[in-house]
Amino acid sequence: MYRCQWAGNNEKMQRYHDTVWGVPEYDEQRLFRKLVLDMNQAGLSWQTILNKMENFDLAYEQFEIEKVANFDEAKIESLMQDAGIIRNRRKIEAAINNAQKIVEMHAKGLSFADYLWGFTDYQIIDNHPITASDIPTKTALSDQIAKDLKKRGFKFVGSTTIYAFLQAVGIVNDHEKNCFRYTELVKKETL
């Protein structure tokens, strides 16, 4: 069974590839979780984040948006001491800020999921990559979403981070065409 090249031979990476990456996600909390994890990946490998994922879930209160939005300075200091996560103050503060921005969206009657999926009219963008080298690190779509998020006050949401996020939450299908997940996801799209 062929998987995308990036999944490698690591069991955790393969499990993530096989069950999570590229699966369309519409749940607010899971979308927020993935955004925070992708923000934390900036400058690091996905393997590093994957190895710390359970610690992130605990440290960030299972990514309950309202809870994270209310983190105070004492909580930030606590997170800065937590070796189980990425201890980068800017990334921690960005996660709190971004939770607050999602709460603001909710107050205006807009869900984060509808906001994100609205950029593609709820359609999955299928790039049909043959190999990993065919997969971009950012696109016009990620540029557009990153720009709009920044305009709304989100932080740590550059185009490259947003593109990785779009791939992970299934808005973009970048599984290689020979990958068994590509075939499964394309079949689901046509049902």
Image: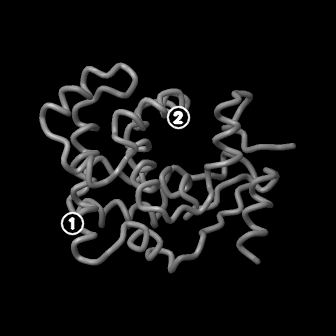
- Near mark 1 (Cα within 10 A), the count class, few <14, some 14-19 or many ≥20, is some
Which of the image's four quarters has the C terminus?
bottom right
Residue 57 lies, in percent from the top left, at: 42, 38
Q: Is residue 189 above or below residue 168?
A: below
For the image, the number of numbered tags is: 2
Nearer to the camera, 138 or 90: 90
> Splitting the image into 4 quarters, where does residue 44 fall?
top left
Residue at mark 2 to residue at mark 1: CA–CA distance: 29 Å
Please tell me whether mark 2 or mark 1 is closer to you in this view.
1
Q: Is residue 108 above or below residue 45?
A: below
Residue drawn at point x = 67 percent, y = 48 percent: 19
> Splitting the image into 4 quarters, where does residue 36 fall?
top left
Q: Secondary structure at mark 2?
A: helix
Asked whether the beta carbons under mark 2 and mark 1 sit within 8 Å of each other, the answer is: no
Residue 137 lies, in percent from the top left, at: 51, 49
Residue drawn at point x = 50 percent, y = 75 percent: 120
Which of the image's four quarters has the N terminus?
top right
Residue 91 lies, in percent from the top left, at: 28, 38
Question: Label 2: which residue?
Answer: 46
User: Label for residue 104?
Assistant: 1
Q: Secondary structure at mark 1?
A: helix
Query: Which amino acid type is shown beneath numbered disc 2?
Result: Trp
Nearer to the camera, 24 or 75: 75
Nearer to the camera, 66 or 18: 66
Does 158 sit left or right of 46 as displayed? left
Query: Which amino acid type is shown beneath numbered disc 1?
Result: Glu
Among all residues in the image, which is located at the extreme right?
1
Residue 177 lies, in percent from the top left, at: 78, 56
